[in-house]
Amino acid sequence: MRKQLLLLSCFVLLSIITLAQRTVTGKVTDDKGIPIPNVSVIVKGTTTGTTSKADGTYSLTVPANAKALIFSAVDMTTTEKAIGTQNEIDVSLRSEDKTLTEVVVTGYGTQRRREVSGNIATVKGSTLANKPVQSFEQALAGRATGVQISVPNGVLNTPPVFRIRGTNSISLSSYPLIVVDGVPSPTGDFSATSAAGNALASINPNDIESIDIAKDAAATAIYGSRAANGVVFITTKKGRSGKAKVSYNVSVSWTQPYGLPDVLNAQEYTDYKNMAAANNPGINSTNPATSGYTKFALATDASGKTIDTRWSDYVYRTGFSHDHNINVSGGNDATTYYFSAGFSDQEGILIRNDFIRKNILFNVESKVNSWFTVGGKIAYSNEKNLAANSSGSLPGEGFATAGLGRIPLVTSPNVAPYNNDGSYNITANNVVGPMNNSLAQVGFYNPVVVLDLNRQNSEANHIQSHVFAQIKPVKWLTLRTLYGVDYLLVDNESFLNPIHGDGFSATGSASSTLGKNKRWTWTNTAQFDNSFSGKHNVSLLVGNEQDRRTSEGFGLNRQTLSDPAFTVIQAGWVTPNTSGLAFGENYLLSYFGRATYDFNKKYFLSGNIRRDEYSAFADKAATFWGASAAWEIAKENFWDKSGLSNIFNNFRLRGSYGKVGNTAGIGDFVIYSSYGSGLYGGLPTLQFNNAGNSGLQWETSTKIDVGVNFSMFKDRLQIEATRYYNDIKDLILNVPQAPSTGVPNAIPLNVGTMYNKGFEFSIIGNPFRGKNFSWTSTLNVTTNKNEVTSLAPGLSEILTSTSGLETVSRTAVGFSLGYLWLVRNGGVDPTTGRRILLNKAGQQVLYSFYQNTGAGIYNWINPDGTRYSEPGQAVGVGVTQAKDGVMFGNTIPKVYGGWDNTFRFKDFDLNVLLTYQFGFWVYYGTWAGLHDQRFWNNHRDVLGAWSKPGDVTTVPKPMYGDNVSNGSALPMSYNAFKGDFVKVKNITLAYNIPAKLANKAKFASARIFVGGQNLAIITDYPGPDPEVSSNGNGNTNQGIDRNTIANGRNFVIGLNVTFQ
Amino acid sequence: MKKQLKYIISFCLGLVMVTSCKRELLSPIPQTFVIDLTAFETPARVANQVTGLYQTFKSGTFYGGRAQIAGDIRGEDFINETTNGVTGYDVWFLNATGTSQNFIKNLWAQAYQVINGCNIFIEGMAAKGTTVVGAALSSNYLAEARLLRAASYFKLLEHYARPYADGNGSKPGVPLRLTAIKEPGSSPMARNTVAEVYTQIIADLDFAEANLPLTYATATLNTTRAHRNTAIALKTRVFLAKQDYAKVITEANKIVAQNTAPFSATSGVAHALQANIVNVFRTPYTTTESILSMPMTSTGGDNPGTQNQLAYYWSRTPTGVGNGEFSLNTVSGIVTNTGWTATDARRSFNALVGTPPKLYLNTKYTVASPFTDWAPIIRYSEVLLNLAEALARTNAGVNVKALALLNAVRQRSDAATILAPLTQTDLINAILLERRIEFLGEGLRNFDIMRLLQTIPAKGTVAAKAASEPGYIWPISSDELSLNPLMTDN
């Protein structure tokens, strides 16, 4: 410091001594001739300089021996101009490649894009704003290379499936770490009811400045043991110095269901089911007493019209939503602020599925003096996630009797929701009334009753706040401390009516639980920055962090209403019980460091290291690290000489390597073998309920990342290509023990290995860049190959069920996670109309649901083509999934990405985003249900079912009661479909009201937009949406569409205005 | 001064950074459960572990509900009403597969969870617990653990292995696991033979008989905890399954002292038939007829849980309780038996309930949600009929005591009827018939069919199933086949 001062004095002195000086004036403009203020103008080789004024002009006294002036400004290419004899030097600065100069959040700090040698993708907040979504990740699909987002169902505020470069864990979470303004955020569904409650919905997408997604080891290693799934940095908006700016955004939107399966109408249903009943000799012949049992018959309503109920009309709706956001920002040189308040009231496509968010954000930062800055954030959000009843779409709900996804598909169309006297059509044994059908049951619940009377609500109060102080005792040192809290308090409240539905057998049931999830994070860092001889730029960061989380839950469940009019838990009930008890605590203590170095912005090196100590492990500490290097070839002289610089304006090679960990989702006390408490007839008990593993360690990922990025034709074309390889070791597998061991849980062991590898490719082009019209197009492509390379010794497979009932997902060595494991369908036998199954050896086996005495359920087709005739032939060996299932197809997409286009024409702009996923299978379990020959209603394609010898069809001869030929009881490839799709994910057309016009109306700017989401989908998939997932973020049971509500189609119209 | 200030602040900040860590938080002490190492440290913990074994045993997927339900719905006396795979449609249809979660997989897993719990307890007592509670109490506790282990193996054999009668126990049984498993690595284990498992069951029950207390202080404990007579009663069932009728007689005679009615146990708990059978199934459920029942309360976790409750399956609202999953077979079920008179008290357990279409249902269990009827496991009337059958089978003609035992059971509920079979075969058949009437809804029907290798009769839309046909016994849990390389399927 003192030395520099001395140096400066010498220069000044020298200048005075020379005495020979003159004044140079001029104007700095951009390439369009618009003046640029605040450009630094310095005499080359000196520190003498000035800055340009608001009109771009400058005036500078220069020594006579001055050779040149150097002009530099933020986002502009630094330009050198020789001083000849002239006294007036005007200069036009070219804007720099924005992507290289923008600031990237790197964890505990920021860097300029060009200085980053790790792999970090950035998405601007503006691309996520004003979208009809509940949380920002839902709008992230297709926006960033390597990032796969799937919204798994149409229930509001459901957490998306969020994967960075594939699925990186088996038993732990594969969700990336989300860091909001420096404080890690909880992720996942915090609702304990049938309403989804994504923790990240607390962040109003309109308040997001940018999202930086760290993907490789170098970029993520600073988060050590939590980095393996990638790290997503959310930066909320800050104020800028200047006059206060007020913005108001409003939008309204409508969401509709689309692609609902086409089911039989009342007449078709009645005829078809009667035929199926007639085809089952067991029903009429073997049990005369139940022969009346098979009759299906139409009924009439009060006006005498035949009842033909479209049950989906009673479950779905067009949801109307409106969203308001107002913010005030501004400040002076010392203090800046951003204040925002939002209100969003959204209706889903399911009746009574609503999302209401009220949120406030206040960011402030104040420079107390030249070396001391303080600031902080207060963010509070209240979200109400409302639902009447189970949608059947959240993980674990796939086969819920009340599941609203399945009910409209299953329920007979020849009965109505109401009796002709206006009362609910329900029976005493809690199903929809059969009306004229003489069968006791033609549906599960009557959805109208549960939608009218039940409640499944969850309300989150989320506080995300922090305070920080920053000191720069000397120029090259920055000390910073940040203390943040994240309190997510969730009130769950449900009521199940006593009349019908899930509350029926309990004569009403209500639950209220409170979940308290609290976290504090305290981070202290010291950052050293220095530059030697103008070329060696060194930066060093050291820090420590404490991250403390506690969770507590408690609540009450009361059953049996004492008065049918009551609906709240505080009313009169018979049975009280506890509900939602939870207790957890953990603590992460870390020390970390980062060093970056670049030589003349040409060679870049960086290294990150973090040592984490975590309370959940017995052996608590481990060290993680990552290193990267980059080479900006375009800065080399030979590049210039070769003439390549005429084509490529930058060209960079980079690579990184490192080792990071994963603890997401691991239990707080997983190391202990333990005994839990319970009751035996009122007496206290202690029972062995958990086998722990005291030697458990972190999952570790070794990540390699090699890539190139370059820009051509003056940034007209920017291309980035990366090869990534993520080798995961010591996978924590919850290793199931053979049930006969009697071990009550799967024991967590560090045993498996797996890799994810692939290419990332993005191309940004500006095919047109005219004054009135421009087109920017970004295509990103990510390929992913996932393979499990080892499991635990003796463990050949991991079978993962969907909602505990149906198992089609098998994870085995040599395959990708959650491979479909199915019995192969051999079609329908034209001679008998029976389903043909292929056994393990590929032999054709005919299946018959009804078994004549002596005839088998399974009959084989002989190699010579002759088949056993029915009845009375030898019994074939049964086909089972365990014996005859094959590894049928992968569920992880091989290729995914997005194609984003922005067109500007004068004051209009149009954004079109297509997303796509290719190369994967979906098990469409709903399809099995749609062909189930119990009372269930069927897809209309059953009208083409086999009816006489010679018929060639995909639908076997219907036989009442048959739940095997369709795959309900025997998972079958009949229900597996290619999921490849291209979606018109988002279209926004906006009109920016010209400044003159806006100013007249006292606006600084105004913008009107219309748009839509999920507008079209190109796919061969027969269901509404191949992107849905019955198992949410499950790692080993993805790609299952079982009774899931599809995403809605959405139209939005809105207005943004700014006052200044 | 200013410069000093910033150095002072910087120094303080640095100091805070270095000293702020709360290292003690890295080693939290569990607050909501007991860790393995300390589970045998106090007499109270050991006592709670014993009740813990019972709690596992009474799980709704096992002896708290589904074990009994499976025993009934495989037989011909019930008709499935809801075609619901979760509530036993495939079990009833006799086409359940090894992937069938709710019966085949869960019952298998729960039985072994009890077995391993018992093994852990037995080893823990040897290592520590016995010194904590003293030898006398310890041997009581160990006897209870071994009885529960035996009962669990016995239920496994019933469903997953060929009956003893098929090859005198030479067929594959189930893996006989007798050591505690708390670590990974023990999955592979081959099936023992049926006979080997029986040997262990009998050894456990013999040990239990020798070491269990004669009685407990309360009627509740006498019904819900194993005592000496419980072990004896269970042995009569086990030997009946083995068709070792002499042993049935030996065991039964220990607690059926008389040659003529009234019969009762004269040592230990004074088991006897109740005057009115209805009272056996009504609160407080603790008559001396109930030798072992699983107690239920309305507190969460202390009852069978969703879709596991006997009343939920058999009965139905509005006149009854529950969901009417299964109705009584009015075509070929026991309710069609004409010798079962309308005035028989046990007929009061059958009723036409519901709004139209009404169904003929079993209403033995009557408590509404959360369905806290105690789940019966063995009653004194079964011991009487076990003894009657053993006597009938081992004595030519119509054995007098066997007939007396049979009529004791019949006339308790139907005083006007005196059964008078004329031949040995008639007597045996009358006893078997009486069992169907007496234990309808208590889960013994499947046991009675299987132990005699009888054909499972047709019912509703389901064809009869001969003992030689596939599906006569359950397949093995697919999880077991997947994770235990030495396991073989049925």
Image (spheres, coloured by chain):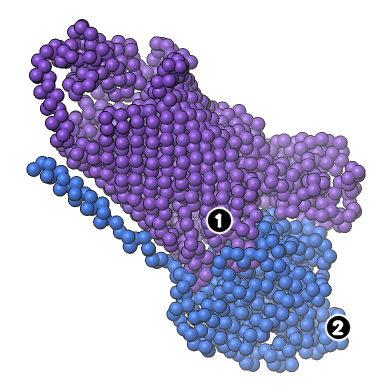
Chain colours: A purple, B blue
Could you tell me which quadrant the N terminus of chain A lies in? top left
Q: Residue A218, how many percent across, how many down?
A: 42, 40
Q: Chain of mark 1?
A: A
Q: Residues within 10 Å of mark 1 (few under 14, many from 20)?
A: some
**B405 relative position to B354: left or right:** right
Residue A90 makes an appearance in the image: yes
- Determine which of the numbered discs, if any, sits on residue B413 in the image: none
Q: Quadrant of the C terminus of chain A?
A: top left
Against B364, residue A300 (above or below) is: above
Circle 1 residue: A751
Q: At x 88% / y 45%, what residue is drawn?
A: A863
Residue type, label 2? Gln
Tag 1: amino acid: Val
Q: Is residue A407 left or right of residue A489?
A: right
Q: Which residue is mark 2?
A: B424
Q: Where, by quadrant of the figure, is residue B103 drawn?
A: bottom right
Among all residues in the image, which is located at the extreme top? A86
Which SS class for mark 2?
Answer: helix
Which residue is rendered at x = 82% and y = 70% of the image?
Answer: B454
**Quarter of the figure with residue A125:** top left
Left or right relative to A737: residue A137: left
